[in-house]
Image (cartoon, rainbow, N blue to C red):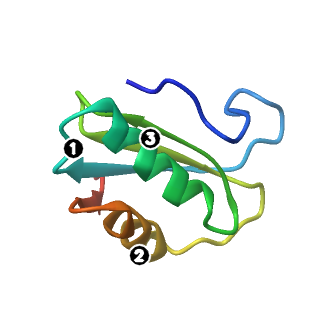
Amino acid sequence: MKLFSRKKDTAAAPGAGPQVVLLVEGMHCSSCGLLIDDELEDVPGVRSSTTDVKAGRTTVRLEEGADVDTAVLVAAVQQAGDYKARPAD
């Protein structure tokens, strides 16, 4: 459950960039999701991040034209705490 984000969610905005979906293990409360979103939103090229703790998924919306390596996003999730992340297939 996502309560707030520091960045405006512009997923439906015209010209919104691509999205990356990560599967995340190790979350147990909404604070976990907030920590992950905060860490991901500090990555250059990330427009917004929305984490669904119950589903174990994080959706990262990138800036249009941004070239962000998925490994950088996975590392950011791991930096947020004791979480394991991988790209969704």
Q: Residue at x 67, y 41 (%)?
A: 6
| Residue type, label 3 | Leu
Q: Residue, x 69% and y 69% (percent of image)?
A: 44
- Give the residue type that dot 1 points to: Met
Q: Which residue is mark 2?
A: 71
Q: Quadrant of residue 55?
A: top left
- State the image coordinates of residue 72 (x, y, percent, origin top left): 47, 75
Instruction: Say left or right for 60 vs 80.
Output: right
Residue 81, relative to residue 12: is it above or below? below
Give the Cα distance between marks 3 and 1: 10 Å
Question: Which of the image's four quarters has the N terminus?
Answer: top left
- Side of 57 relative to 19 (left or right): left
**Residues at marks 2 and 3, CA–CA distance in whole angstroms:** 20 Å
The mark closer to the camera, 2 or 1, is 1
| 55 over 18 or under it: above or below | above
- Amino acid carrying mark 2 in the image: Ala
Mark 1 or mark 2, which is nearer the start of the sequence? 1
Q: Nearer the viewer, residue 10 or 42?
A: 42
Q: Residue 27 bears which disc, if any?
A: 1
Tell me the tag on residue 61: none
SS category of the residue bearing label 1: loop
Q: Which mark is residue 34?
A: 3
Would you say the residues marked 3 and 1 are in contact, meaning their CB atoms lie under 8 Å apart? no
Judging from the image, what secondary structure is the residue with disc 2 in?
helix
